Amino acid sequence: MAKPRHALTRDLIWRLEAAGYDLFSFLIRRLPPDVASSLGAWLGRRLGPLTGAHRTALQNLTLAFPAMADTERERIAADQWENFGRYIFEFPIADRLTPASGRVEVEGFERLTAIARSGRPAVLISGHFSNIEIMAAVILAAGIDCDITYRAANNPYVDRRIKEGRFRYGVKLLAPKGAEGARDLLESLSAGRSIAMLNDQRYDGGVAGVFFGREVMTLPAGVRLALKFGCVLQPMAIQRTHGARFHVVIHEPIPLRGDGDKSDAITAGTQAINAFVEARVRERPGEWWWMHRRWPASAYAALKG
């Protein structure tokens, strides 16, 4: 049966986007890492403020820092776009941004190697800091058998290329979504493999907590699974030092209650993740991705009142 015209048009657009992605990756992989990163920084700082996401970034900064001067919010938003531009241009060369390359130094690396030696799975969490690919590179460098969660791209041809780029340096990916995704995570931990996730975005079906003094909904899956399997809940933070170079901090594990009401334990653990992410954002606000709507719709509606 022939595809409907709109499906053929969509498929053509997807294929053209994938061809553009291929050309972009081809060109970037021929540049030295710092040159590619600097080019992304230059473009990000100039183009980011022209997008609709810039308004969202400024709204988020207003919600997080209501007393901050507008000029300071604009500065942080511009720093964010510079960092995000670097990330986009660093993605095709992520296999060159690893601890073995000398471009990633790690503080607290022994915490990860202890997980690898233990033979027991762990739940590793971080946020959208700096370059999110560095998290996977460090986990793999420690020898941890880990499935990395990610959000699949809408374009299936581009998604395949993104996965292939990550496979290039050994990353194993999961795209958890709904009940099937939860089963995938369970299967990973049951098989003794760790899981890693970014735990700093809005999740409407999640657990209520506080972030920058405002109520948010946060995905509780990491905490719930860590409690179920008796896993370490290990937070990580990625910092950009200069150019395409990074400093990764492996923080102390987040303690979870092992007794009492399970629901309370999940809520407390999820709030501990919120507090961890907030502390890291306050330390380096220009390296967090402010373009995501983190708070409920009511918080943004109140800004217009």
Image (cartoon, helix red, strand yellow):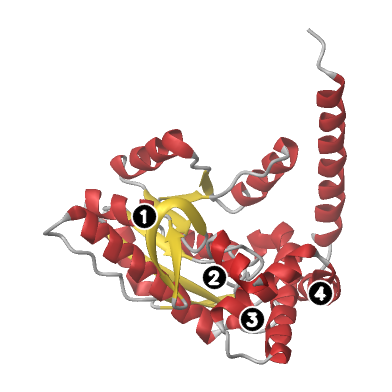
Is 6 above or below relative to 187? above
The amino acid on which the numbered mark 1 sits, given as a three-letter code, is Gly
The amino acid on which the numbered mark 2 sits, given as a three-letter code, is Pro
Q: Residues within 10 Å of mark 2 (few under 14, many from 20)?
A: many
Which image quarter: residue 184? top left
Q: Which of pointers 2 and 1 indicates the residue nearer the eye? A: 1
Task: Pinpoint residue 172: horizontal percent, then vertical percent.
Answer: 51, 46
Q: Secondary structure at mark 2?
A: helix
Q: Do the CB atoms of the residues marked 2 and 1 lie less than 8 Å apart?
A: no
Q: Give the residue at mark 4.
A: 35
Q: Give the residue at mark 1.
A: 222
Q: Tell which of 89 and 46 is nearer to you.
A: 46
Q: Give the residue at mark 2.
A: 99
In this view, which residue lies farthest toward the front? Answer: 305
Q: Residues within 10 Å of mark 3 (few under 14, many from 20)?
A: many
Which of the marked residues, 4 or 1, is nearer the chain's N terminus? 4
Residue ID at (40%, 74%):
276
Q: Secondary structure at mark 1?
A: helix
Inter-mark Cα distance, 4 to 2: 19 Å
The amino acid on which the numbered mark 3 sits, given as a three-letter code, is Gly
Which of the marked residues, 3 or 4, is nearer the chain's N terminus? 4
Is 282 above or below relative to 43? below
